[in-house]
Amino acid sequence: MVFFPPGTYHFKQSVKLKDGVVLRGAPPSGETDARIEGYRLESILEFPKYEFKASGDGTPIGTAFKAIELEEPAKASKCGIVHLSINRGHVLLGWAEDGTCGSDRMVVGCILRNTAFADPGIPDLKIGQKPWQRHTWRFGAAIELKSSENPPIANNRLPKSGDDDFKMDGYMVVDRKKQPFDYDNRPGIYANHESVGGDGGGGPDGTPETLPLGFRKGTVILHNYIYSTGRCAIGFSGDGTICSENMVRFPPDIWRPTTTGRDLTGGSSTNDNRAMEIRGWRWVVDGNNYIVHRNWSFERQHRINDGEGLMHEDHANSTIKDSRLTNNKGNTYLSMYKTAGIDGLLVEGNDIRLDDGRQTIAGGAAIFVSANRTDDAFRAAM
């Protein structure tokens, strides 16, 4: 255990976490529930701020966007962070290239602000972008934790980031010249989030035998608060994952001129705004509270195409098996979409009240369930 007494600690580089080491701060002295506004921590880790410069090659990406990560992802076990307030640093407890990783990794009781990555593919000089352009990486989560078993991600708070966002006048998106860098336009929590099957519903569907990396056991995602302006708030895969009593908040009127950093948004664009992306078997999704809104497209005349609440879809996924979707409360629909088979699913006690920004699939239904794929019929046993 490495203990940080109350105070502010400045780091110039990423922190490399060793096998068997837990970084721990002082516990909260007041409110102990991270979902409540008054949750505060006094052990603060500060990483460098990105100082944007709209000239020349711009400020190098490597000057900021640091992380708490693993020194040896293939074997690091019984490690993680507890009760630390982290500014400008994301948490990346990943695995080796072949999927090998240790067990019992944790992120518990922490606060994270300004946690976005910079997209490594921006600027795209081939389409005329300026060397100083930057864009939020849409696949870089604030917390990404992978573990061979038993990873708890609990009682963390990802609040609105604050003052680090920056505007980029002159940003080239095809032929337009304005774009913000939004630190909250990123996935919130990825817990053993892995492809489980073929892309786009093309199959084959994943099983523990064919894709064991997507069916690891013991994942618990509990009592977290996630503020997002875009992307997926919580994403997981696994066998027996418990994802319960989390709170997700998307603001209603975010303008999203581009989701890729290259192309303008239209009605068919997506930013994957959803409270939860569910993959795997035997999951329990219970007691979550969420508000999700779609972003406005470039023309500000309509919203782009996403906005699900809790979603298990066929893309890179498995069938549904022996799972529970219970006692959740939200403003947009539950979606079990083209799952290619459902063998045991309880949907009960949910309170879904659609609003004016709802997704219109299935006529605006609060619960949408379809085992059929586009060309094939499948059995749904609920």
Image (cartoon, rainbow, N blue to C red):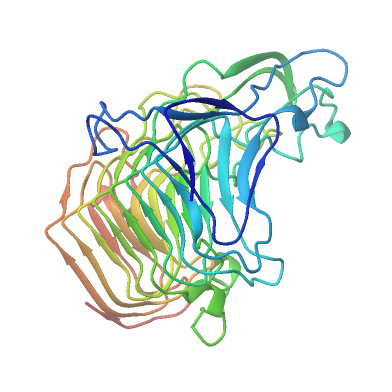
Examine the image and state in which quarter residue 292 appears: top left
- Residue lying at 68% horizontally and 55% vertically, measured from the top left: 71
Q: Is residue 343 above or below residue 48?
A: below
Residue 57 horizontal/vertical position (percent)? 86, 21
Who's the residue at 75% across and 40% down the image?
120
- 329 relative to 117 in the view: left or right: left
Task: Give the side of residue 131 with respect to residue 82, left or right.
Answer: right
Q: Position of residue 124 (x, y in %)?
A: 81, 34
Establish if 337 lies above or below 49: below
- Depth check: 345 or 228 in front? 228
As rendered, which of 363 and 151 lies closer to the eye? 151
**Residue 230, position in %: x, y?**
48, 36
Q: Is residue 219 above or below residue 10?
A: below
The image quadrant of residue 135 is: top right
Which residue occupies the extreme left position in the image?
349
Q: Nearer the viewer, residue 151 or 121?
A: 151
Question: Which quadrant is the C terminus positioned in?
Answer: bottom left
Q: Nearer the viewer, residue 25 or 74?
A: 25
Picture layout, residue 261 above or below residue 284: above
Q: Which residue corresponds to the image point at 77% horizontal and 13% vertical from the top-left?
A: 54
Residue 380 in picture, x, y percent from top left:
29, 79
- Which image quadrant for residue 6? top left
Q: Residue pushed farthest bottom?
A: 209
